[in-house]
Structures are given as C-alpha cells and as structure tokens.
Image (cartoon, rainbow, N blue to C red):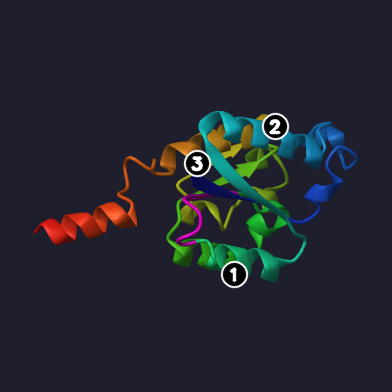
Amino acid sequence: MRAILVIHGPNLQLLGARQPHIYGAADLPAINRQLQAAAKRHGVRLEILQSNHEGEIVGRIGRAKGTYEAILINPAAYTHTSVAIRDAIEAADVPAIEVHLSNIYARESFRQHSLIAPVCRGQVSGFGAASYLLGLEAAVGLAPRAADSPSPARVRSRRKAR
C-alpha cells in the first residue's frame, strides 16, 4: 500500500485554541481524522507526526526515502527559518507538498517567505483545514501506484527472462 508521511510542525497541537481567527476552529485531531478518511478513500496509508522539535522533523524526513511515496508538511514557523528542514526535504528525494492553514503571503512580511517551498513540488495555503486535504490530493497524485512501479518480484522475473 502506498504511504504518505504527514508532518505537522511546531505549535500545531494548539490548533482550535490558538488564534482561531487566523488558523480556524478545527483542532489537530479533527484535521488528522479528515486526512485519514481521505487517505482511506484513496487507498493510501498515512503516518502522522506532530513535533515542536526541528531535529525530530529532520530525522523523520531523512528516513522517508524507500518508506513513503510523498510527504505532506506544514512546517509552521520553521517555514521561514529552517534550512535544516529544507535540506532534509531536498536530500530525501521524496516529493513533498507544503501546506499552511493561513495565507502566509497575506500576513506579516517575515511570514511571506518560505525556505521550504523551493524544494517542494507545490504549496497550498490559505484554505484553513482544507489546505491539508488539497495538499493530500496533490500528494496522492505524486505517489506512484503499485501498478506504475514494478514489485521486486516482477523485477526479478523480468531479469530472469532476459
């Protein structure tokens, strides 16, 4: 089964209570339930991580190749500061989609620049919790289907036939 890694960055465990006028009323468990339901419809498995620790996020991205077909990431405040997360995504060689609940380009000037976006396949922002669902749709589209990528057994049998 195809697998997608979902990463929620710092302070996202506070969703629903923290600045709902900016981030919306949905809390993180509700967003995760919506993501899981959408993933099930698409026949993909999600692994979900929320961390306030940059090193934990970098480590998980670093172990993504060969395990996940795509990464859906809301780097939160690390969007604007983390060269380490940017480098990890670039090195992982796994397609990534950056998501944000708020429109970062309509906010304070320091929030209008993403260090992460240039190493991602795309970015979705400004649609509240729906940003995650739209990002998941994109990630599913990037994740190769089992029929598109041969299984190790099929590769071995092709080699024997030559």
Circle 2 SS class? helix
Q: Is residue 82 visible?
A: no
Question: The disc labelled 1 sits on which kind of residue?
Answer: Ala
Q: Is residue 7 magenta?
A: no
Numbered range of the magenta stretch = 65-72
Q: Position of residue 82 (x, y in %)?
A: 63, 65
The structure residue drawn at horizontal position 48% and vertical position 51%, both measured from the top left corner, is 120
The structure residue drawn at horizontal position 78% and vertical position 48%, both measured from the top left corner, is 12
The structure residue drawn at horizontal position 54% and vertical position 68%, both measured from the top left corner, is 62
Left/right of residue 21 with respect to residue 129 in the rendered view: right
Q: Nearer the viewer, residue 106 or 6?
A: 6
The structure residue drawn at horizontal position 66% and vertical position 30%, both measured from the top left corner, is 130
Q: Nearer the viewer, mark 2 or mark 1?
A: 2
Question: Tag 1 or tag 3, which sits nearer the N-term?
Answer: 1
Circle 3 SS class? helix
Residue 139 is tagged as: 3
Q: Position of residue 80 (x, y in %)?
A: 65, 57
Q: Position of residue 125 (x, y in %)?
A: 62, 37
C-alpha distance separating marks 2 and 3: 15 Å
Q: Nearer the viewer, residue 78 or 142?
A: 142
Question: The disc labelled 3 sits on which kind of residue?
Answer: Ala
Q: In the figure, 149 relative to 34: above or below?
A: below
Q: Nearer the viewer, residue 24 or 111?
A: 24
Question: The disc labelled 2 sits on which kind of residue?
Answer: Gln
Residue 34 is tagged as: 2
Q: Residue beneath label 1, please?
A: 84
C-alpha distance separating marks 2 and 1: 29 Å
